[in-house]
Image: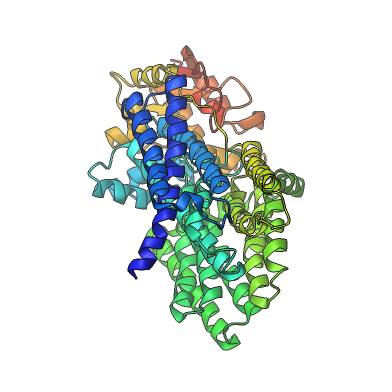
Amino acid sequence: MRRERTDRLPEALRTLGSVAAGLLGFCLLALAFRLELPVPTPAAVGGSLAAVLGAGLALRLRGSANEAEPWPSCGALSTLTAASTLMGLVAAYHLAAYARLPADILSFSESGFVNDILKFRLGLPIYTPPTDNNSSPYTPGAPILTYLISRALGDGDSIPLFRVIQLSYVGLAAVVATGACHLLARRFLSPAEYRQPARWIPVWFPFLFLAALDPRFNPYTHSLHNDGLALLVSVSAFWLIARHSISPRPWLLWVMAVLPALGFLVKQNQLMWGAVFAVYLLVAGQVARRTVGLFLLSSLAAAAAVVGISYALWAEPFVYWVFAALGQKQVALARSVLHLFWAGPYVVMALFGGWALVLRNPARTSLALWLSWLLPFLASVYTSGLVWVTNHLGPGVVIATCWALVALARAWPSPDPAWPRWQFRVKEATVVSAMVLLAGSLGYVREPANPVPPDFFRYVGDIEREFLGVSPDRVLLDYGSWIYLRENVLMRDRAVAVAIHVGKNQPRISHAMLSETIRRIEAKTYDKILARQLDTGQTAYDFQNRGSGVKAAMLAHYREIRRIPEVQGIREWWPKHLVSEILVLVPDR
């Protein structure tokens, strides 16, 4: 046992040195671009440099740097580890800047997310009548869990802490996805190909972390949105399948039976994993059909129990917001096909993984494993036609990355005695360069800069000043619930809820659900209304001027007294209209 631990020391030192090299690169970027770090930048540079030199010296003293067996090449994999670590640290720097924002206007979902936390904290129903227009079409598992964790950490009111907890879901999802890669490697790779996992895991984790934050397919996982926790549920479901393929233990079936029901509390589409599990079990053929039947009954019973308890708690409003509100949306197949093409690089990665791993080890279980990526991905491609963003594909692209990263280990160049040494090194350098360039093409390489301009805080301050001297329940702010959270005020007629009824992805506007909102505006219930882009066709209260009646009522019964200028210096946001110009309206008496 002692010898085994000793043999692992060189790999641990290489990993430490590679990660430290990535950290050193980040610290040098921080020094060059004058980035703010939690510790003095020169100290960070010195510490990371000492770690690199210390690890290299320890390896040299052990004589491990001159191993006779160069495969996989320590230098090439160390370079790839350092590069992926550097990219991951730059992404984390961006996320830290976003996480610190005091206002919940980073993504469209944040207002509803914080609103659900406020309801839960006040002991109010999560789902209220549709005409109140202050509910979200998502299930409440993510906001409730986030709030409970924040309370346990001592601060149930901090929006930055809420975001940090959300990001912890994403980090944990990357850890679980790395575990899934390890299981796939155990199943598909030979002992020679996967002789030392410590050489591959440090490469896999940063790439999976970056895939979990892909700006095109996971654009909301860094904000207050259900996607972060839903991603964790999805990769956990795939991990269960990969684990079952290696060792079909009974306890795995019990977890599989319950996970879709729990996932439903996070996001409705997580119920699909029940069907995926069933297909996997049938195709793999590792358990009896009777057991599969019992599994299906158990999974359906768990889902029915969760839905039944939710209905008992929230009655008809739960049914409307969770099922009916989204059910009235129409899938545009052209959008679905377009999104599939946008995800083309990830599809190619998954196909490459299937070719390199499954086709070279043909078996029912291997095919079932690959189908466990394909089926939920195709379902997500279809449902992405409901909307204009591609976040439905987020879990699928992370799992596709798992397949590609394990296939990379199999495809890694191996030395041949007949080759000149330089030829082997050139092949390795080519693979490393290709991986780094692929990461850049996928949007993983971010600019080493703070993405939040100082003017954002002016914008937040201007909004907060509009509440001074006025009861907060008399000021309607279209997006953003941080002031209401602070004052324990539950507001109606929020833009995020109204937008559900007026979207262009449904044939008709739900005028019945807007009637009370229009009545309250006509009655001048609010002393002040703050609405973004109200004089354009981009306002959530009447997107593209479809005739919701809400915008018309505001302009007819309120007058503009001033405007809050948009945030200057914003290059990207989710969506950008959340930091656009705000019209400040008061009743037209």
Q: Nearer the viewer, residue 110 or 573?
A: 573
The x, y position of residue 459, in whole percent, is: 42, 19
Q: Quadrant of the N terminus?
A: bottom left
- Asked if 262 appears above or below 76 in the picture, the reply is below
- Asked if 255 appears above or below 17 in the picture, the reply is below
- Asked if 512 appears above or below 172 in the picture, the reply is above
Q: How many marks?
A: 0
Identify the residue at horizontal 39%, vertical 56% (top origin).
Answer: 9
The x, y position of residue 317, in whole percent, is: 46, 53
Most distant residue in the top direction: 561
Q: Nearer the viewer, residue 404 or 497?
A: 404
Hey, which quadrant is residue 70 in on the image? bottom right
The x, y position of residue 353, in whole percent, is: 67, 59
Q: Colour scheme of this structure image? A: rainbow
Visible residue check, residue 352: yes
Hey, which quadrant is residue 68 in on the image? bottom right
Residue 40 placement, left or right of 190: left
Residue 469 placement, left or right of 504: left
Identify the residue at horizontal 67%, vertical 65% (top origin).
Answer: 357
Visible residue check, residue 493: no
Most distant residue in the left direction: 154
Q: Quadrant of the C terminus?
A: top left
The x, y position of residue 97, in whole percent, is: 41, 30
